[in-house]
Image (cartoon, grey):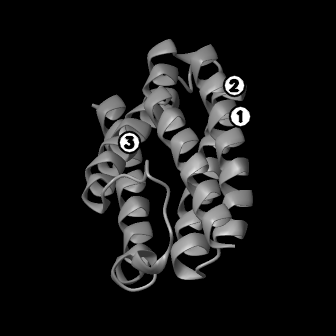
């Protein structure tokens, strides 16, 4: 039961952080964001909520799975979990920088750091639990795409 509770706890934390990030974006989606020039590959706005919801759930499951391995290698787990928490904080910060401050350049710099941290988190997770690492791959792919999108939006609007 404790293992399931750990996974549920991390999933809830990730989903709450996603919800709070969404609160920052809501107003800008209807006011500021439509005024930006966007690349042809910009997805429709409706796609972001379901994709991010799924990604936050997968991140939470992966994080909970790593937490459940605390008894097998405490040092590796603590290191991996610190990276997980750091990338989650950067994930939330990006929404504030891009949508809250309306600063695509600062958000671009930050999302590059986020991407590097997600990659490191993936590397640490896969050493502890291969499935947990694999659960981060869609997140890594989406943030890679988001980085290109963020960079394109900055370039087109500078």
Q: Is residue 101 above or below residue 146?
A: below
Q: CA distance from mark 3 to mark 1?
A: 22 Å
Closer to the camera in the image, 95 or 76 = 95
Closer to the camera in the image, 79 or 45 = 45
Of the numbered discs 3 and 1, the one sitting upstream in the chain is 3
Disc 3 target residue: 55
Q: Nearer the viewer, mark 3 or mark 2?
A: 3
* The quadrant where residue 131 appears: top left
The image position of residue 42, as x and y in percent, is 42, 53
Q: Quadrant of the C terminus?
A: bottom right
The image position of residue 115, as x and y in percent, is 65, 42
| CB-based contact (under 8 Å), mark 3 and mark 2 | no
Disc 1 target residue: 79
| CB-based contact (under 8 Å), mark 1 and mark 2 | yes
Of the numbered discs 3 and 2, the one sitting upstream in the chain is 3
Residue 106 badge: none
Q: State whether residue 11 appears in this view.
A: yes
Q: Quadrant of the N terminus?
A: top left
Disc 2 target residue: 76
Closer to the camera in the image, 89 or 22 = 22
């Amino acid at each position: 039961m404790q293992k399931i509770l750990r996974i549920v706890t991390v999933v809830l934390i990730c989903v709450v952080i996603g919800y709070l990030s969404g609160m920052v974006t809501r107003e800008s989606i209807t006011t500021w964001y439509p005024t930006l020039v966007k690349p042809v590959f910009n997805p429709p706005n409706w796609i972001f909520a379901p994709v991010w919801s799924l990604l936050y759930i997968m991140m939470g499951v992966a994080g909970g799975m790593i937490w459940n391995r605390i008894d097998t290698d405490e040092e590796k787990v603590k290191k991996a979990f610190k990276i997980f928490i750091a990338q989650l904080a950067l994930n939330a910060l990006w929404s504030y920088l891009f949508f809250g401050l309306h600063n695509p350049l600062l958000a671009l710099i930050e999302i590059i750091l986020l991407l590097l941290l997600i990659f490191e988190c993936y590397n640490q997770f896969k050493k502890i639990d291969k499935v947990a690492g694999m659960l981060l791959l869609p997140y890594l792919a989406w943030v890679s795409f988001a980085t290109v999108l963020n960079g394109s939006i900055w370039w087109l609007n500078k």
